[in-house]
Image: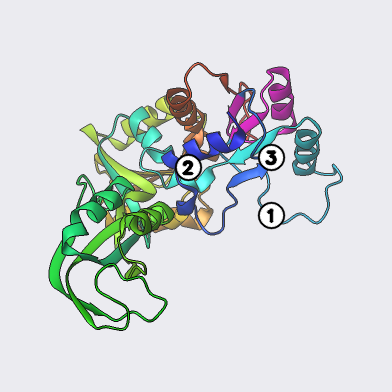
Amino acid sequence: MIVQDVVEKLDEFAPLAYAEDYDNVGLLIGDKKEKVKGILITLDVLPEVIDEAIENNCNLIVSFHPIIFNSLKKITGKTYVERVILKAIKHDISVFAIHTALDNAFEGVNSAVCNILNLKNKSILIPQSKTIKKLTTYVPSKDAKKVREALFKAGGGSIGNYENCSFNSNGIGTYKGNNNSNPYFGEPNKDQNLEEVKIEIIYAKHLESSVLSSLFKSHPYESVAYETYTLENGNQFIGLGMIGDLEEKISENDFINFVKKTMKSDLIRHSKFINKPIKKVAILAGSGSFAIESAKLAKADAFITSDLKYHDFFKAENELLLLDIGHYESEQYTKNVLEAYLKKKIPNFAILLSKINTNPVKYK
């Protein structure tokens, strides 16, 4: 197994195509063709994490946060980022970051927090738009079934909990080939009329290459007529944050104590109590002040996130309870999500969880 094999498996779980535009995800250090000896999973990549990888004979680090985020003009070892890069390269260690691709995955970071808090009926808080594409093509009637099945096999035609979805309409296609043509039906330089089926399907944008490849391989025409569109529809299975329900309503004070204990948070900053029981809970692990309005629109009773500034707490406006539980604390279970997935996909392989607490924030 090489690095690229692991990257492809991770991309199946949390496609990099859905990472936020500002992010830096993917293979950041290393050779994708390098044979993998062992995998170390971490939240952050620090010099001591590189040492841990060396000690455990792991030459691939799968990290949640990217070690390279801002542009670098030189690598001299002056900063911890530069020291990590130098040490990783020196010891032939590859580093892969998944960050907001996993944030946007339905079973990713925020789902993990929902599961820890035992929230029910979970759904995406901010569905990502422009992740769904539409394909329209025209196929001879007798070949329509074969082409549809090929598109479905490539992942096309999936809508929510439904598969093999398409819309088909019958019509007459016309064409006239030139001297260099090799028409499927008829002869060159002659007008042709043929019964065709117009097939329309939708597909996830990260599947475009495989969907179009299947179209070209299964379609009988020498020149395939097709159109693709990007839809504005929100994707109910891809997006930032989640919202779910507690089994029973509890008081604000009991809720804070429950979150503090369950999320192992030493300190929780919160907005003022509004004397409202908590039932519906919104979550956005990491820095989530931008999602406060979305949580309010979703009628959440409480919103759990981190990195809230002074003025962010005013935005609660007596509509919900805001909880800042700490950046590390909100994302700490990310490692477990990645470990469980990779162990399922690559059984009987050396996949280790980093034992290093990378939280840079300390409380006294």
Q: Are marks 2 and 1 in contact (CB under 8 Å)?
A: no
- Residue 260 position, x and y percent, is 43, 29
> In percent of the image, x 20 and y 58: which residue is there?
144
Q: State which tag comes first along the sequence, 3 or 1.
A: 3
User: Is any atom of residue 136 visible in this view?
Assistant: yes
**Camera-nearest label, 3 or 1:** 3
- For the point 64% across and 40% down, the residue is 32
The disc at residue 278 is none
Quick one: label 2 or label 1, which is nearer the N terminus? 2
Residue type (three-letter) at the residue carrying disc 3: Asp
Q: CA distance from mark 2 to mark 3?
A: 17 Å
Q: Nearer the viewer, residue 210 or 300?
A: 210
- Quickly name the residue at label 3: 31
Any mark on residue 11, and which? 2
Q: Find out whether the residues at labels 2 and 3 contact each other: C-beta distance under 8 Å.
A: no
Residue 93 painted magenta: no
Whole-number angstrom distance, CA of label 2 to CA of label 1? 23 Å
Q: Mark 1: which amino acid?
A: Asn
Q: Is residue 317 visible?
A: no
Q: Which residue is mark 1?
A: 70
Task: Give the magenta-colored segment's residue range.
Answer: 39-62
Residue at the image point whose x is 57% and y is 48% from the top: 25
Mark nearer the viewer, 2 or 1:
2
Image quarter of residue 337: top left
